[in-house]
Amino acid sequence: MIIEINKLKKIYAGRTVTDIEQLTINTGETVGVVGNNGAGKTTLFRMLLDLIRPDSGEILSKGKNVAAADQWKQYTASYLDEGFLIDYLTPEEYFIFIGGLHHMGPREVMDYLHGYEEFFNGEILERGKYIRDFSKGNQNKIGITASLMQQPELLVLDEPFANLDPTTQIRLKAHLRLLKSGKLTTLISSHDLNHVTDVCDRIILFEKGKVIKDIYTTENTLEELEAYFSQ
Amino acid sequence: MFSKFLHHQWIGFWRSRNKGGTIAAQVILVFFALYLIGVCFLLGFVMEDLIDKFLPGRDVFTVFNGMILYYFAIDFILRLQIQELPTLAITPYLHLNIPKRKLVNFLQFRSLMSVINIFPLIIFFPFCIRNIGPEYGNFSCAIYLTAIFSLVIFNNYAALYFKRVSAENIKIVIPAILLLAIVGGLEYLKIFSIAAFSDQLFSFIVAHPFAGLVFPLLAIIIFLINDRYLRNNLYLENLSSGQEKKSSTDYPFLDSFGAAGTLAALEIKLILRNRRPKATVTKALLLLFYGFLFYKGDLIASNQFGKMLFPAVFMTGNTIMIYGQFMFGWQAAEFDGMLANRVQIKDFFGAKLILLTISASVLTILSTFYAYLSWKILIIHLAAYLYNIGVSTIIVLYFATRNYKHIDISKGAQFNWEGVSASTMLLALPILLSPYLIYLPLSLIGPYWGLLGITVLGIAGLLSRSFWISFLVREFNKRKHKIAAGFRERS
């Protein structure tokens, strides 16, 4: 068990956006978080990363409350939105900066990125542009790659498939499946039911901040989810 | 179509997200402009008496003629500083069925609607009508009015053209600054005088009125140049940032500071690659000349260091105050990432301290040119410098943990009030006043004792830095969610 959520509540302007009684995520799971806009997916991720404070309750990462201590940063990598990128850096500079935080030298970082050439499709490295001048899809690629590069034990991605071109979506899916090693726990939110059921072992469905469904993926899962969303 | 564009700008202004701040800033600016217009009116109507009073015995017309080009030379430099490029965000209109001609015309026309264009008219027109007319005849008067009006137009478009071209190619700024420096220097050394040239020119025009038509001609030419430039560059790619290749850089000398050094290097890039922080830091260099207002021979001779302490603290520490007041806000856009990444808050503060220390050191070294006034100034600056890096830095960073306002660093710095709040305003007070708490009592023994006291305080701050860093980290952790939430609210 890597994540344990107890009685977590967040209220914005009188509206409850997160209300989780009890939820645990086991080590090595790949978990898909789905739900319509306003279901509280991003809010949950932000609380998990100690970016916003819950109104009550707690999130334990490896048994430690994330809001109390910084240890979770040692093994957690995340990409939620462009706010995680440093937009006045070139992609190379950004990767080297992030690598440096994890004690990777510039050479090591560039070697590592070598393995992502296919994923980058020649669009990212050595383009002579700052991150702010890239398209949204390519910015996404930079953020996702930077988070993967940290070789985390817990990976948190908010809508990683959004804005990506079809080829990259397929490559990302393959890559995420490849990463399942028993050690890496992944949390992915997505609006694309095909992708999440493809990649994830477990799907958690949120509605207005509450867990509505928590199921292990089988061949019927996609239908089940589609049935829920087409109500 | 013009009225529709104007209407869009108007509602765009009122519906802007941080409208509280923008409107407050605009209101202040409007009052300021009205005040200036009033002053100009007064100047215009009593100009004759003023010249008589301040320059008795000089020919009123010679002085007036001399003033004209002088005014417009300063006017041009001021425009480069404060006149905004008219930016109707034209992107949403480019693909619509609107002729490009109209868009260009609108931009050109819109740029004239600036209060800077009104000042010269109010200052010069009354004198022309009341004095030039009766003295040299109505025709000459009309030529004067045309000339001044044309100069306004000329300056308006020349400044905008220069700004547009220099935004695209920064290299032309250097020769331009050189040219300005040379003209300024010649004027200062009294080899060439703009005023004398201006007088000759306008005396010539009085004698040969038709020569005055050269002004409207020049105005039309610069208008057309601007027009062509705009029409040829009205493309999305020209509106966004430059096309030159950006390369990766690093600053090896900061590596020795470890993780904090890496973060400091990051922030140096932030400053160099974004408009507002770059302009803010450049301003710091200009403020180095502030001392000339304060450092007077008699103050130095009588060791009245108290009166010189203020400019010394301000000059050696102005980046700490002016850049530091928006600390964290500069990084608003990537603040979430900073928090979620494996960055230790201790290093985060360490980086800020490195950066502030480097900037204060550079300013202090540059300010040594005041030594030609007296070596005593060096001592004051040294004391102020140690105080700044030891104490001011901590004060600034403490107040920074109470600043929750997002800043868009790609916008210009001039009249930009985004991110300014009460705490940023109050920040300067403790920094500028606290050295006096030490200096004043000790200076009763002797002025050098006062300086020594400040130095000791600064060194004490430096030696106890690690204590203060953990204090700041504690304060930061108390409020980090609030800061992050504030930064997420983009304006």
Image (cartoon, helix red, strand yellow):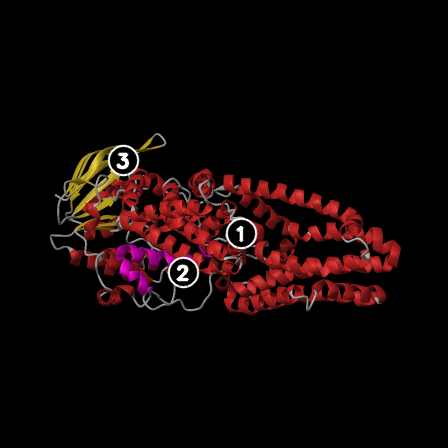
Left or right of B78, for residue B259: left
Query: Which circle marks residue A54 in the picture?
Result: 3
Q: In the image, is residue B273 part of the stretch drawn in magenta?
A: yes
Left or right of B273, for residue B107: right
Q: Amino acid at mark 2?
A: Asp
Left or right of B340, for residue B376: right
- Is disc 2 in contact with disc 1, using a CB cutoff of under 8 Å? no
How far apart marks 3 and 1 lie (CA) works out to 59 Å
Front-most of residues B29 and B127: B127
Provide the residue designation for mark 2.
A133
Q: Which residues are magenta?
A: B251-278
Provide the residue designation for mark 1.
B300
Q: Amino acid at mark 3?
A: Pro
Q: Nearer the viewer, mark 3 or mark 1?
A: 1
Q: Chain of mark 1?
A: B
Q: Quadrant of the C terminus of chain B?
A: top left
Q: Position of residue A183 (x, y in %)?
A: 12, 52
Q: Position of residue B354 (x, y in %)?
A: 34, 54
Q: Is residue B244 above or below residue B436?
A: below
